[in-house]
Structure formats: C-alpha cells, structure tokens
Amino acid sequence: MAEHIGSKVIQADNEHMSLSHAVDQAHGVLLLHAIVPSVALALLIVRNYSRFFFLQVWGWDDIMLNIGWLFSAIMAGLVCLSTEFGMGRHIWDVSRADRVEFLKIVWVCQTVYLLASFFTKTAFFIFFARLASSGTYYTASRILLIFNTLVFISCLFTGLFICLPVPFFWDRSIEGGRCLHIKSYYIANASLNMAMDVTTLLLPAAIVWSSPSISIKKKLSISALFLLGIATCICSILRIPTLARVTEKGNDVTWNMKESSMYSTLELNCAIITGCIPAIKPLITTLLGKATPVGRSGLMKPPVGVKVDSWVLRAHTGSYGASVTAPVIPNSVGRGGSRADHEHKKGPHILLEECLTVEEMRTSRESILATLSRERSGSAVGQLHYAGGVRRSESRTSRGSPAMQSFLR
C-alpha cells in the first residue's frame, strides 16, 4: 500500500484538484463501527452471565472470545478515528498531512485486526476440542489451533515489518525505504483467513452430525446455532476484492478503504456473535421454561468441588429414583474430589447431568459424564466410583462431552 501511495497521491492531485466539493461518507463509517460492536458486546455480556453465573463454569474459550471482542472494539475505534484524517472521503479532498496520519492508523489497524481474528478463532477451536472431547475431531481441533497460531505469528511479523524502515509505510519521503509487495501480502492473509472461517463453520457441523446418540431433529437445531457463521464467511470472501482495490496503483485509497474496514468489522463481530449463541442457549431455554435447574425443592446448586458444565438434559414424567455417588479419592488433586449425592423422587422431574473431573497424580485428565435414567416407571440405581484409577459403573448411559450436552437442553 505504501509502495503505491505516492503514485496515488500524485495522480489524484493532478486529475482532481479542480473539484471543489468534497464527498464525505464518514457518517456511515461511524454508524456501522458503533452499532455492530455494540450488538456483539450486548450478546457477549449475556454469554458471560450464562457461563460465569448461571452455569457457573468457564474455560479458556470464554477468555479468548472476550479478548477477541476487545481487539475488535479497538479496531472499530481506530477506524472511527481515521475519519478525522480522510476515511470516507476522496483522496484529492484530503491534505498531505492527513494522508500520512491516515496511513499510520491503517498500519496499526492491520495489526489489531490480526489480534482480534486470532483470539476469536482460538476461542472457537478450544470450544470445538471440548465439544468433540476425543477422537478424530478433537485432534483436528488441536491441529487447527496450532495452525491458526502459526498463521497469526507469520502474518503479524510480516505486517509489522512489511516496510523498512517501518515509518516508510506512511512516509514516502524517507530515503532508502523499501516495502514488500503489499497487495500480495493482503490477498494471501485474507485468503488464509477466509479458509479458516470456512473451516470454523464446517467443523462443528461435522462433530455434531457424526454423533450417533443425537437425533436428527437435535442435529438440525444445533446446526442452526452456527448459521450466523455463514455471514462471517461471506464477509471474509467479500473482503478480499476490496483489499485488492485498495492496493491497486492509482486507486482512491481513503475512499475505498471504507469497504474493506466495513467487511473486516462485520466479519469479526459476526464471528463473536456466532460464538455467543451456543453459550446463551441454556439460559434462554431456562427462561422459556423448556429446561430448568429448578427442581421440586427449589434452585439446585452444584456441590463444592463438582464441576457442572451443563445442568439438565430434558424433562421426564413418571416414577423415577436415582443416585449418583462419587466418593472422595485420597490424595487426589482437582475439581472433582468431593462427594456428591443427588436423589430424584417420584413424580415429574428434571434429569441432572454432572461432569465430575478428577485429576490424580498423573499428567492426563479424564472427564466423566454420568447420566442415570429409566424412562418408564420403576427405579434405577447406579454408582460411579473409582478404585485405583479404574472406572466402574452400572446402569450408565454416556451421551458425549459436557459441552455437547449443553446443546441438548
């Protein structure tokens, strides 16, 4: 971009200096970059309430998604600031001093965008690994997480030092300065980003549809939660030609940059909103009365030391009795070392799901999801316990990872 900006400025000055009126679309730029991140923030707040206070669980994906939104908000603020220096106006209506300041903001924005995209995608891949729990898709999620990190590091350092010295990016008067082919860098970066967005859309669908224990109806409803990811992919695809136009020689950079910044902001925030919806679902279904952690004796809280990743699976009617026992393991380390006993008596009830995580003196961690049920009248009694690190269970049905269970509510 800096490689061509000199020729852009000269051509624009020669051809358009006679135009006295200034066309300004800064208002539209400000409006979009204020509304879209605000909508994402509102849903992120609800997501945080659902995860941290309602379900009382959190993971690294929650932290990463919040950091991703923070950087996307910083980028939106920088874009709004750039309207003071020419964003949304034709380049011939922008002073030379403002053009320099505009390019400084562009240089910072491209770095902040990479950070926002990296943390947002990292949140998704961590969540997918928890959703898959084990197997091929778990491995695929970890590989994609590593690949995303490598792409981020390479693009970050290339973008920071694409011109040497660095100020040559915005100041062409520096003698001896040089830049790499900026157009090729932008297109390559945007193409990799698009491929990762498509992968982020397809991977959860593959995880859900490969599960034999989930009904077709449930698979369709779970897949619908990620439909907004299609909008993310569309924005990512449309962003590529706008970057190509911005970096073409003789182009109107301050005018055309508004399109690429618009698609960048929409892409990031659509991805963040997509990541919020699955975590909000347990809270919404509870408020609508379709699933609730409130039993006959009132609100049920998880015992101290027991991690409950999702509360209830579904409502049942009929006679039922069940108990789940997890005895304390001597010298155990972790979140699941305490005893948890739960009894559901006859009458309408909600089946409680618990995820007991026990970390013994070893490097690996095993997560157990115990669901004891009997659909018809009668009783079902089961015990799940450990002895010397060996799991034994009776009358137990496993229905996937705890993260998967939160979708089934």
Image (cartoon, rainbow, N blue to C red):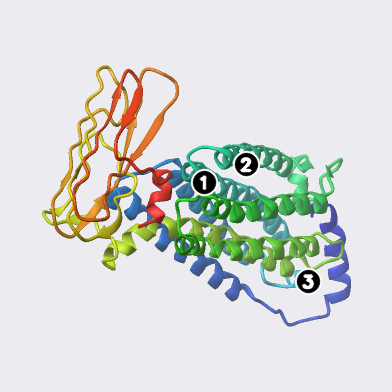
What is the spatial separation of the Cα atoms under label 2 and label 1, in whole angstroms?
A: 10 Å
Q: Earlier in the sequence, mark 2 or mark 3?
A: 3
5 relative position to 221: left or right: right
Q: CA distance from mark 2 to mark 3?
A: 44 Å
In which quadrant of the rendered view does residue 187 lie? bottom right
Specify the label residue 384 is tagged with. none
Residues packed near mark 3 inside 10 Å, few (<14), some (14 to 19) or many (20 plus): many
Residue 128 badge: 1
- Quarter of the figure with the N terminus: bottom right
Does label 1 or label 3 sit earlier along the sequence? 3
Which amino acid does the dot numbered 3 rest on?
A: Trp
Q: Residue 87 appears at what percent x and percent y?
A: 66, 67
Q: Nearer the viewer, mark 2 or mark 3?
A: 2
Label 2 crowding class (10 Å Cα cut-off): few <14, some 14-19, many 20+?
Answer: some
- Which label sits on residue 144? 2
Cβ atoms at labels 2 and 1 below 8 Å apart: yes
> Could you say whether the residue bearing mark 3 is in a helix, strand or loop?
helix
Residue that appears at 74% across and 65% down: 242
Does the residue at mark 2 contact the one at mark 3 (Cβ under 8 Å)?
A: no
Residue at the (84%, 52%) spot, across then down: 3
x 11%, y 54%: residue: 297
Tell me whether circle 1 and circle 3 mark residues in contact (CB < 8 Å): no
Q: In the drawing, does residue 189 fall left or right of residue 109?
A: right
Q: Secondary structure at mark 1?
A: helix
Residue 300 visible in the picture? yes
> Does residue 367 sit above or below 22 in this rendering?
above
Q: Which residue is mark 3?
A: 92
- Residue 257: percent from left, percent from top: 71, 65
Distance (Cα) linking label 1 and label 3: 48 Å
Report x, y in % for residue 344: 16, 49
What amino acid does circle 2 point to? Answer: Leu
Camera-nearest residue between 220 and 203: 220
